[in-house]
Image (spheres, grey):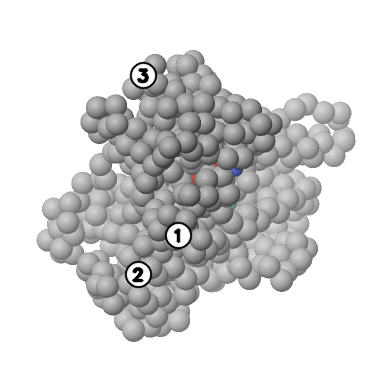
């Protein structure tokens, strides 16, 4: 039996493990932290005595590989599909955004037309830019930032702030000045233009720990995969152009025949042997840059909205998730009556997400929280009367790689120059931005390379949603 070792228990490593385990090749996963999930994970909040996510993670209908991963391991049931999105315009009015009965790409035209915070002139202008965006990207276009492209295509500051920023900054977690045209195009084509279901937002109704620490761990271990938590990889050992093992911080060596290193881009080079670090194919890794995402967690003594979520337009807050409404089961511990803890048992929990939160760098936590509360009060005046029982603020400074122009040329393939060593991670060559889908794709691609080396040519990577006929005719999209 072949021994397969996977370094890193984030979604990329987990996806490689799931693909291989499902085909009868159990693996050993080495993870430095006490839990799986990597950047998509929870931590324990001692005040509420609950696991809360480092940040709300959502996925879209177009994320076919992530969905396949969830269905394979039985965690798909922990996601709820939002039938509509609620956009809160600058006046505070909520616009319901949902697909009509027309086929793609016309299924969302009614919803766009009804957005109350864009004028007809704005809508016409963005429709013409959308048509231009659907065209294949030329090499020259790819060298400029999306912000410049928007200006070149006559987009006013209002349309940029109220439309392009809202969609792209949450999808790619970067400012428009640091987004490439091809990454922007991918978001719109995959989520809005190619297929009716691409835009649906699926939200986990349990903390991420339940997904990756519970059900998924059971799925893997019951099929023979070993999970080594709190085991930090120090070095990939290479003998005669072949990886022989992974040396841990404890000096223990985990030997194997096939290896997947699924670490973040800013860690990976530190564990690779010198001879690999200098390989031309891996030099781009050093130039990858990261972008931050912040989440503000608030517990109130009363509900502040009935909406399950809200997308704020042209404000600091970008998404508000009503976790109390979303969570399937409130996992709380009992506590003494009248204690702060007992108030928290009945508290209403909301999570505010601010992607590409570069501007928060110079602000204190208090200043950010004040601005968030001010915006929530403007939209839902009941916030002024509500008692804030508890709050947390988390900023992941290296949340995602920045999809800057030219970034894809820096991303290495999963197959390294060493035949029995694969890389995986959302930052490797997947064609996708830094998302759970991108991470799962990278893991599936790494697993597929290992299977090929064993003479198996399984279709590990799942196909995209098929492009609708009308989308091909109107926008010239390829299937
Ligand atoms: C705040 C935030 C919000 C996000 N929101 C979304 C969202 O809504 N939707 C979405 O699709 N994506 C979102 N993402 C992106 C998504 O989380 C990532 O793209 C994805 O989880 C990356 O997975 P990965 O396996 O490539 O990397 P990671 O999750 O970083 O996994 C790498 C693993 O390696 C481990 N490790 C590091 N060093 C060592 C070592 N020496 N030895 C052993 N193990 C080691 C780490 O602990 C980690 O578990 C978000 C990310 C963040 C941070």
Residue 40, quarter of picture? top right
Viewer-side label of 3, 2 = 3
Quadrant of res 451: top left
Does the CB distance between marks 1 and 2 fall below 8 Å? no
Above or below, 446 relative to 134: above
Residue drawn at 12 percent across, 61 percent down? 473
Q: Is residue 215 visible?
A: no
Residue on which the image places disc 1: 283
Name the N-terminal-most of marks 3 and 2.
3
Percent x, y of residue 347: 72, 41
Above or below, 291 relative to 428: below
Q: Is residue 363 visible?
A: yes
Residue nearest the observer in this picture, 432 or 243: 243
Nearest the viewer among 196 and 252 is 252
Callout 2: few (<14), some (14-19), or many (20+) C-alpha neighbours within 10 Å? many
| Residue for point 31% across, 35% down | 448
How many other residues sit within 10 Å of disc 3, few (<14), some (14-19) or many (≥20)?
few
Cα distance in 3D space between marks 1 and 3: 35 Å
Q: Which disc number belongs to residue 24?
A: 3
Residue located farthest toward the front when viewing the structure as drawn: 240
SS under mark 2: helix
Q: Label 3 vs label 2: CA separation?
A: 41 Å
Question: Residue 127: x, y in percent?
Answer: 28, 72
- CA gap, disc 1 to disc 2? 23 Å
Mark 2 Cβ and ligand 1 under 8 Å apart: no
The residue that label 2 is drawn on is 181
Task: Name the secondary structure under disc 1.
Answer: helix
**Earlier sequence position, callout 1 versus callout 3:** 3
């Amino acid at each position: 039996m072949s021994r397969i070792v996977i370094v890193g228990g984030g979604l990329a490593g987990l996806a490689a493990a799931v693909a291989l385990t499902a085909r009868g090749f159990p693996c050993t996963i080495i993870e430095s932290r006490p839990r799986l999930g990597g950047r998509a994970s929870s931590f324990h909040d001692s005040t509420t005595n609950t696991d809360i996510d480092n940040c709300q993670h959502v996925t879209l209908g177009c994320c076919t590989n992530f969905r396949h991963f969830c269905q394979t391991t039985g965690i798909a049931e922990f996601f709820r599909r939002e039938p509509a999105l609620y956009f809160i315009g600058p006046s505070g009015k909520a616009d319901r955004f949902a697909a009509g009965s027309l086929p793609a790409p016309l299924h969302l035209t009614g919803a766009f037309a009804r957005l109350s915070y864009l004028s007809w002139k704005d809508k016409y202008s963005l429709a013409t830019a959308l048509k231009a965006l659907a065209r294949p990207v030329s090499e020259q276009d790819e060298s400029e930032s999306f912000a410049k492209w928007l200006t070149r295509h006559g987009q006013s500051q209002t349309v940029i702030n109220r439309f392009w920023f809202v969609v792209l900054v949450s999808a790619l977690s970067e400012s428009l000045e640091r987004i490439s045209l091809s990454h922007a195009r991918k978001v719109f084509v995959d989520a809005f233009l190619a297929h009716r279901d691409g835009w649906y937002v699926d939200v986990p109704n349990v903390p991420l720990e339940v997904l990756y620490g519970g059900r998924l761990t059971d799925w893997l271990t019951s099929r023979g995969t070993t999970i080594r938590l709190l085991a930090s990889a120090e070095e990939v050992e290479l003998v005669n152009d072949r990886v022989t093992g992974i040396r841990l911080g404890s000096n223990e060596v985990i030997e194997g025949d096939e290896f997947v290193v699924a670490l973040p881009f800013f860690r990976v080079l530190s564990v690779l042997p010198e001879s690999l670090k200098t390989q031309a194919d891996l030099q781009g890794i050093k130039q990858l840059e990261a972008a931050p995402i912040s989440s503000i967690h608030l517990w109130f003594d009363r509900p502040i909205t009935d909406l399950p979520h809200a997308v704020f337009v042209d404000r600091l807050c970008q998404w508000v998730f009503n976790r109390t409404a979303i969570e399937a089961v409130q996992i709380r511990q009992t506590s003494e009556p009248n204690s702060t803890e007992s108030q928290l048992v009945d508290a209403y929990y909301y999570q505010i997400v601010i992607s590409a939160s570069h501007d928060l760098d110079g602000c204190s936590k208090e200043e950010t929280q004040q601005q968030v509360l001010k915006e929530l009060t403007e939209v839902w005046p009941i916030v002024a009367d509500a008692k804030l029982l508890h709050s947390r603020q988390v900023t992941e400074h290296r949340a995602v790689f920045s999809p800057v122009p030219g970034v894809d040329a820096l991303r290495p393939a999963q197959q390294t120059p060493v035949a029995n060593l694969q890389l995986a991670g959302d930052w490797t060559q997947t064609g996708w931005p830094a998302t759970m889908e991108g991470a799962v794709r990278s893991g599936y691609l790494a697993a597929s390379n290992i299977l090929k080396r064993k003479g198996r040519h399984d279709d590990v990577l799942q196909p995209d949603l098929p492009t609708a006929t009308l989308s091909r005719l109107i926008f010239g999209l390829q299937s």
